[in-house]
Image: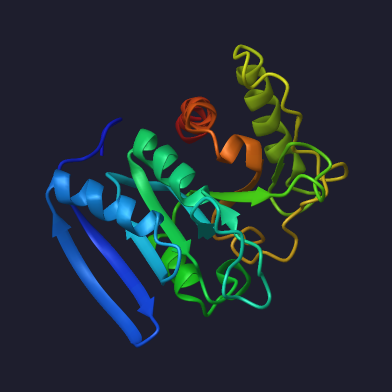
Amino acid sequence: MNDIIFVRYIFFLCIRLHSGLLSSIVNLNEGCENMSIAWLLNDPVNSYLYYLAGTTEKVLVAAPHHAPLDVSTLPCASHPTADENTGWIAYELASRLNCSCLIAGNYFLDPNKYKTSDYFKKIEAVQPEILIEIHGHGSVSATFDIEISCGSREKSPLSQRMATQLATAFSNHPGLRYYTISGDFDQIHLRATKSLTINTNEWTAYHIELPFQLRKDPLQYKIMCDQLKNIILEMVSG
């Protein structure tokens, strides 16, 4: 998977339709693949778990609460609010990193809260060194525009370093420089303390909460993905 798109992959795709569970492995050419990804990520109704293998599994980028723009709710009582457009951002970032990508779309349960979920089990099977989870917030609940957490006060130095690096990168872009960013566990509101995919010693996990304004603007989130790519590559090489 290069910066544009890898010509052929194998997909692991589970689509839970109202009539039951459809599970398949698909090997697609580039044109069909692009169409299928767009079809999936823009689907406003069906629940699915989508996995795309990259050329490296050191990093896995995931979005557990994706729904398309203008679909604000999920069919999940414990997490009824959708993180609109986060699946597209996860896919864009994974494409830049040539790494694997996992997206739960319109999902019927809160998949990062249960070790028995298909979502958690897939991460466990991949065993990445670094997990990047993309989330979205509605601004009123967050203290900062972008909040990054590794799930605990003990791991706060890791999230603070990423936040500082991202803020420095944003300062060079007029459209992004005004976003406030923090990874300080004691200052942020969205700490991901109940997320089992974040609070684990099986991999190093980063929970990144993004505001709607950034998530809805392809120009802004693609620039952000470019900057996150550089930060994550530095982490992996270090």
Q: In this view, does 201 lie above or below 22?
A: above
Q: For the point 63% across and 58% down, which residue is it?
A: 198
Residue 126, by quadrant, is bottom left
Number of numbered discs: 0
Q: In which quarter of the image is the N terminus?
A: top left
Q: Where is residue 116 in the image (x, y as percent from the top left)?
A: 52, 80
Query: Seen from this angle, which residue lies furthest bottom?
Result: 19
Q: Which residue lies furthest to the right in this view?
A: 186
Residue 106 relative to residue 29: left or right: right
Which of the 4 image quadrants contains residue 123?
Answer: bottom left
From this viewpoint, which residue is outermost toward the left?
A: 29
Q: Identify the colour scheme used.
A: rainbow
The answer to whether residue 54 is left or right of residue 33 is: right
For the residue pair 89 and 111, the one nearer the viewer reads as 89
Q: Residue furthest front?
A: 70
Q: Position of residue 53 (x, y in %)?
A: 29, 53
Q: Is residue 206 left or right of residue 147?
A: left
Residue shown at the point (24%, 46%) measured from the top left: 34
Q: Can residue 125 be seen in this view?
A: no
Closer-to-camera residue (231/74):
74
| Placement of 149 over or under 47, stated as above or below | above
Q: In this view, does 159 lie to the left or right of 105?
A: right
Residue 10 visible in the snapshot: yes
Residue 171: x %, y % from top left: 66, 15
Vertical comparison of 24 with 217: above or below: below
Residue visible at 72% across and 54% down in the picture: 151
Residue 87, percent across and down?
Answer: 47, 51
Q: Residue at x 51, y 76 (%)?
A: 117
